[in-house]
Image (cartoon, coloured by chain):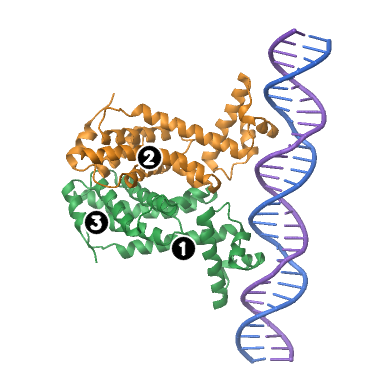
Chain colours: A green, B orange, C purple, D blue
Amino acid sequence: MTDDRRLTSQGQERKQQLLDQAATLFAERGYADTRVLDIVQAAGVAKGLFYWYFENKEALFRELVELNRLNLRRAQAEAIDLDAEPLGRIRQGAEASVRYMAQYANFFSLLEVENLEKQFADELRKGTAIHTADVAAIIRAGVADGTIRDEDPEVAAYGVVGTVGYYGHFHRTGRLDLDPDELAAFVGRFVVCALASDESIARRVLAARRS
Amino acid sequence: MTDDRRLTSQGQERKQQLLDQAATLFAERGYADTRVLDIVQAAGVAKGLFYWYFENKEALFRELVELNRLNLRRAQAEAIDLDAEPLGRIRQGAEASVRYMAQYANFFSLLEVENLEKQFADELRKGTAIHTADVAAIIRAGVADGTIRDEDPEVAAYGVVGTVGYYGHFHRTGRLDLDPDELAAFVGRFVVCALASDESIARRVLAARRS
DNA sequence: TCGCTTCTTGACCCGGCGGTCAACACAGTG
DNA sequence: CACTGTGTTGACCGCCGGGTCAAGAAGCGA
């Protein structure tokens, strides 16, 4: 199994190059329309080399998705102030996600990935499920403290995850020509207003700044 | 061109059968993983018959997407009371869309389709673009009359379209086990709260009933 | 220099899938 | 019944893309 392969630093660089090129191409064309040949040509290497580093096309894709998921999660964790109130945390996480997706436009949102290939659906839903569960836990706390409308936290969490995913998608596909920070701020307002139990709470949360 | 073919009633039934079977399979497996052979086997006919009715697999898919788009649009138009205030219309359209998608689970939301195949992307965005423009026009009126928060109507419209699309997707893929009417009502609340300029307006709109 | 390991190449293989089309069946009409 | 048009069949074809692997190159350490 290529996963257990010990690579020299040169090997690691080569592998990363393939991953980078693949990420760009998958984002541009989708998984199905990106051939292994396209990836290796973009990297300037021969086709057989691909299989030294990856078991197959699918394995490379899964590795990319997992990397993306972990990086997104890290960006969210870094942006979220654990001492903030629940709705503030929702806002921070949503804004961070939008920024992350704008910055790494060659990685696509989890929901886009989820839709792309049915063969990956069950496993790829893992990212969405984890993110949704995180958001739901925060919403539950917000409902309990009265700052978030009394809705089912699981259901509401899908609204946050979906909003982030869609705005990432529209931005990446060129239909929203906004500065990433502007877009992140808009998405933050959207989800805060959607969830806040009244407008004074929404106003307070949106006025909060984190440095 | 098979589009100009005059079909007997028998031919029309056969063609519809193929479309129906294809819709189900595309929804279950995606376009790429659904072969022409799968479709004709599901319909109980021979493979060559497919090409009597459709130029190719792609043509069938495009026809399905167009049918779906028109039907969704019709469902929205029927649900929207033109005399209602803007935010109420937004709510009605969103709820109708969610209901439509729950009812026709073998047709998928426009945004899902959009993501599926890059080869169709430009044309398939037509549905999203039309829907978004409709919603934006309503939002613009709502911003003008002060009932909708002062945001860019185009940007906000993507939030409505995206929310509907995502909730349709989660419901269809079994992660939201809600009655369609319940789900529609939730989505209606979500978008109304996200957009309303203050909570008394949100309350008024959500209290409104249309028989 | 030699031996071993890692990395790289590209011609080739093969299975799968979209699409073809000659032959045939069926239905309707004069 | 003969003719015409519509509808149907399935063996076959060709192309494409994922994957293979023997041969060779490069790198490293003794």
Image coordinates of residue B196 in percent, x first then y, are 23, 42
Residues at discs 1 and 2 in contact (Cβ within 8 Å): no
Image coordinates of residue A162 in percent, x first then y, are 37, 48
| Residue B148 seen in the current view | yes
The residue pinned by badge 3 equals A88
Left or right side of A47 for A210:
left
Residue type at mark 3: give it. Gly
Q: From mark 1 to mark 2, how far is it between C-alphas? A: 36 Å
The residue pinned by badge 2 equals B133
Q: Is residue A55 above or below residue B206?
A: below
Residue type at mark 1: give it. Leu
Q: Is residue B113 above or below residue C3?
A: above
Local crowd size for mark 3, using a 10 Å CA cut-off: few (<14), some (14–19), many (≥20): many
The residue pinned by badge 1 equals A67
Left or right side of A127 for A196:
left
Q: From mark 3 to mark 2, how far is it between C-alphas? A: 31 Å
